[in-house]
Image: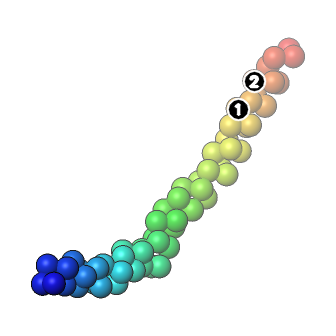
Amino acid sequence: MSLPASPFKLSSPSPPARISRSAPPKRMSFPASPLRESSPSPPDSRSLPAPATMESLPRPP
């Protein structure tokens, strides 16, 4: 009975520990990084079509 009591007690602190890892502020920080990278992504897309248009111009002549 003493043996199962140990794992049982460990299981109790397990749920709270998981909640601490899943902290919402930590999760918000994760998506914040990709979101910031997404911001520079749109400008990158505009830079891509910009050079493509230049190539299209010299192509006809």
Please determine whether, in this image, residue 57 is positioned above or below residue 28. above
Q: How many marks?
A: 2
Residue at the image point whose x is 47% and y is 79% from the top? 24
Q: Amino acid at mark 2?
A: Glu
Which one is in front, 2 or 37?
2
Residue 26 image point, x, y percent:
42, 74
Note whether residue 16 is visible. yes
Label of residue 51 in the image: 1
Label 1 to label 2, Cα distance in Å?
A: 6 Å
**In the foreground, 16 or 61:** 16
In this rendering, is residue 56 above or below 16? above
Q: Is residue 33 left or right of residue 54?
A: left
Name the residue rendered at 86%, 14% in the picture.
61
Image quadrant assignment for residue 16: bottom left
According to the picture, the residue beneath numbered tag 2 turns out to be: 55
From the top left corner, tell me how far across and down residue 35 is, in percent.
57, 62
Q: Residue drawn 70% across and 32% down? A: 51
Q: Is 27 located above or below residue 59 in the figure?
A: below
